[in-house]
Image (tube, rainbow, N blue to C red):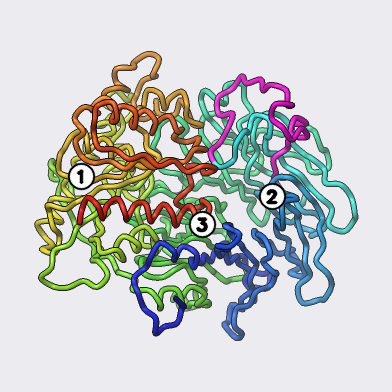
Amino acid sequence: MGDGVGDVRPMQPADVASLIDVGDPRISPDGRTIAFTVTTVDIEANDYRSRIWLADTDGSTRPRPFTQGEGRDQRARWSPDGRFLAFSSKRGDDGYQLMVIPFGIGGEVRAVAASKEDFEDIAWSPDGTRLAYTARVRHPRYEEKKAKDQPPRRIERFFFRLDSVGWTIDRPRHLFVCDVERDAQPVQLTFGEQDDSGLGWSPDGRFIAFASPRHEDWDIDRAVDLFRVAVDQPGSDPERLTPTELEYDRPSWSPDGSRIAFLQGHPSVNPTHTQVGVMGSEGGDGAVLTASLDRNCGPYVGGAREPIWDGDDVVFGIEDSGNTHLYRVGADGSGKPEQLAGGDRTITGWDVRAGVVAFTAGTATALPELFVIDADGTDRRITDIGAPFSASRAIQAPERFTATSADGTEVEAWVIRPAGFEEGKRYPTLLNIHGGPFTQYGNRLFDEFQVQAGAGYVVLYANPRGSSGYSQAWGRAIRGPKAKVDPGSGWGGVDYEDLMAVVDDAAAAFDFIDADRVGVLGGSYGGYMTTWMLGHTKRFKAACSERAVNNLLTMEHTSDIATVFEDYVGSRHIDDPDEYRRQSPMTYVREIETPVLILHSEDDLRCPIEQSEELFIALRLLGKPVEYVRFPGESHELTRAGAPRHRIERFEILLDFFARHLS
């Protein structure tokens, strides 16, 4: 079917192939042009394509593609004089290239660096002669194509691999600088076993600040410091700028070079709100600027952006009640943060330069587009790249409601009516549970919900206690009762009560919900909660537990982030295995009677495949109704960034399963 406005139909699994994302806006130094990335799906190649687009901030001409988009062109960065754009490019299977392309002056695109690994951070030097970037550095073992020919790995630390990335112990991420005017090899500035991330040039071009865990027990206490390294002294020891206690990230130098803004978290009291802070450029504790918001200032969507200096202010994003908003705050700490862009939407990227504020944002019924904030404070949409998709599908808008949990706590929730809704008719319903748990369901067009609604289901979702987007106390409410700081119910406590209240209150408030035909599904922590629910209630007629945490005890020594669950539970698994068992869905597997579909990716390192194998084997041995589907070659990110064909097949499997049990 086409994308014409006259061809309106519900969203279907195959529509994954038509999804478009607009993000990562960057404003030219003169404030007149915005470079941004447009990502599309190539269903024939079973892959994604991205290209750099340009748009005028005054809207005088239509936005247009700037690069060919034969592979993946992304992370466009303007040179200080605005005459060039640098970007990362992957075309074919020969690795990545750091490209520089002229803007408005003529000339050819050229590669200034090449790597087998992606360029993850890119930044121009203040004088425009050099580019700094981070990339992973491969051990010589990778020159051997066959694993059996490679030497063994010696591991002495935690966090030696990462989901969707693979081995990191022999591929650390380091900082490089290359000369864009001379044909010379890039110079590696940092070395060692630790990953370096985020980078910011000092205005005088002498130093680059970055984040890294470089102390002895970095894998035990998980603290991350800020450092600076002298650009003209490659291999010199980086200078530590922060006390080794907290988790610092994304340094950003003030225009006059006197201060550094940063993101800050607490590595051992999770969940915790990421805060924005500022310190002197010579280092120190710094001052937090955003505590009064009591919101997470490191959004899951768009949270990788550093605080942006705008005169004496810094601009940043926050999560708030299902939305992601844009704020500014004075760097001297004298005033309270003020909202720049709000509304029922998810802001996915932003930039501030030359008096211009630009951002990309989507809503529950519209894919992300590019916006500019005008002088009167209103925002103006610049693009309509995703509009044909929304116009040709019967996109269903959510309705917000409030559920009341067992202890009287109010829980924010949403309901979406099925496509083709008819008054007086009752429909099967699916309760969706997000992962994290410290994330949030938000106001953005979510393919999961629209495909379910398109198949004739009422869609329920909520942000129960443990979610981000609300107070820190809300997020910490499911820390374990043995936690030394802010103890709570543990997983499967008030979060379970909140979600059951959402189902009960929705069934009472909306007469189109068939309370006898309710299913439940979720991934990661959402998969945990799905399996947990099945062991504690017979309310649901069918369930899909996906990439789930089913056994906290084994997760604490098999996940790529093993040992971090202690933050929630409040004790180590080797010291207190009974508490891990108490909070594990597997402990209650004999109580499960509901038909279960188990979905898992075979290359999932966050929730390893053994988590689903354990659940399947137990249910099968107990003679319980269970189906098990494994996706080869996929990571924990299957539903968001997996192979497009697998994403479509997954939808088809889900809809078939629930149709058989909820029809």
* Mark 3 closeness class: few <14, some 14–19, many ≥20 residues within 10 Å: many
The dominant secondary structure in magenta is: loop
User: Residue 512's image quarter?
Assistant: bottom left
Instruction: Relative to 286, say whether 613 is above or below.
Output: above
* Mark 2 closeness class: few <14, some 14–19, many ≥20 residues within 10 Å: many
Where does the image place residue 569, in percent across and percent down from the top left? 34, 26
* Mark 1 closeness class: few <14, some 14–19, many ≥20 residues within 10 Å: many
Asked if marks 1 and 3 touch (Cβ < 8 Å), the reply is: no
Using residue 258 as the reference point, say whether residue 584 is left or right of it.
left
Image quarter where the N terminus lies is bottom left
What residue is disc 2 on? 119
What residue is disc 3 on? 644
What residue is disc 1 on? 498
Asked if residue 585 can be seen in this view, the reply is no
Instruction: Relative to 424, say whether 175 is above or below.
Output: above
Q: Which mark is residue 474?
A: none
Write down the region rendered in magenta. Answer: 134-163
Amino acid type indicated by mark 1 = Asp
Asked if marks 1 and 2 touch (Cβ < 8 Å), the reply is: no
Using residue 410 as the reference point, say whether residue 288 is left or right of it.
right
- Residue appearing at x 67%, y 23% in the figure: 153
Where does the image place residue 247, in percent across and percent down from the top left? 52, 36
Amino acid type indicated by mark 2 = Phe
Circle 2: element type: loop
Amino acid type indicated by mark 3 = Pro
In the rendered image, the residue lying farthest to the top is: 575
Instruction: Relative to 44, say whether 2 is above or below.
Output: below
The numbered mark, 2 or 3, whose residue comes first in the sequence reads: 2
The numbered mark, 1 or 3, whose residue comes first in the sequence reads: 1
Instruction: Relative to 108, say whether 489 is above or below.
Output: above
Using residue 108 as the reference point, say whether residue 653 is left or right of it.
left
* Count of numbered circles on the image: 3
